[in-house]
Amino acid sequence: MTTTESPKHTITALVEDKPGVLNRVSSMFRRRGYNIASLAVGHSEIANLSRMTFVVEGDESTVEQVTKNLHKLVDVIKVSDVSIQNCVSRELALVRVRANVQTRSEIMQIVDIFRANIVDVAPDSLMIEVTGDEDKVDSLQNLLRSFGVLEVMRTGTIAMDRGLGDEQTDKDNSSSTHRMESGL
């Protein structure tokens, strides 16, 4: 029996930075029956606006419906499916792994191979910080399992278009338009 996994799509939304927005957005996903595989939210480069990054599982029509429904929400300014564009996506994870005198050096070698960092050392454990795409984080976590993974905390995926992207192009166009209108 084979299982087919739905493709993952990364969607970003520029939203108003005010109380209740995250609840309204996540409630829309719940009401419509969409599954959020990952969600990250943080301040954007524009005052009073935050950027949400969702990873949604589903086919093209599901992603189209998600973006249309996000556009309907009052607090949502802009929605982009960055998975169809040339983008950079990253995830941050902290992994606490059991370590003793005998295993510590082997764990440190694995951490170096993944270009990760040891951010905390205790007598019986190490805390590792890893940044990369989902596959890199998963691979490191799987390799560390044999030592005893005690705890994992992952941020979820964040993503941006490569190059200037739509946001910068929009800002540049509005700035030049403003300069032309003001005679500068």
Image (tube, helix red, strand yellow):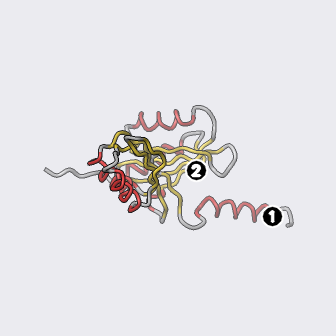
Residue 72: x percent and y percent? Answer: 53, 42
Q: Residues within 10 Å of mark 2 (few under 14, many from 20)?
A: some
Residue 184 appears in the picture as rendered:
yes
Residue drawn at x 38%, y 42% as measured from the top left = 125
Asked which quadrant contains residue 178, the reply is bottom right
Q: Nearer the viewer, residue 114 or 68?
A: 114
Count up the numbered dots.
Answer: 2
Amino acid tagged 1: Arg
Q: Is residue 170 left or right of residue 154?
A: right
Residue 35 appears in the picture as rendered:
no
CB contact under 8 Å: marks 2 and 1: no
Q: Which residue is mark 2?
A: 78
Asked which quadrant contains residue 16, the reply is top right
Mark 1 residue element: helix
Q: Nearer the viewer, residue 102 or 184?
A: 102
Mark 2 residue element: strand
- Which quarter of the rendered picture does the C terminus lie within? bottom right
Image vertical order of residue 96 relative to residue 111, above or below = above
Q: Which residue is mark 1?
A: 179
Residue 82: x percent and y percent? Answer: 48, 58
Looking at marks 2 and 1 on the same chain, the residue that comes earlier in the sequence is marked by 2
Residue 156: x percent and y percent? Answer: 45, 47
Q: Residues within 10 Å of mark 1 (few under 14, many from 20)?
A: few
Amino acid tagged 2: Lys
Q: Is residue 40 left or right of residue 108?
A: right
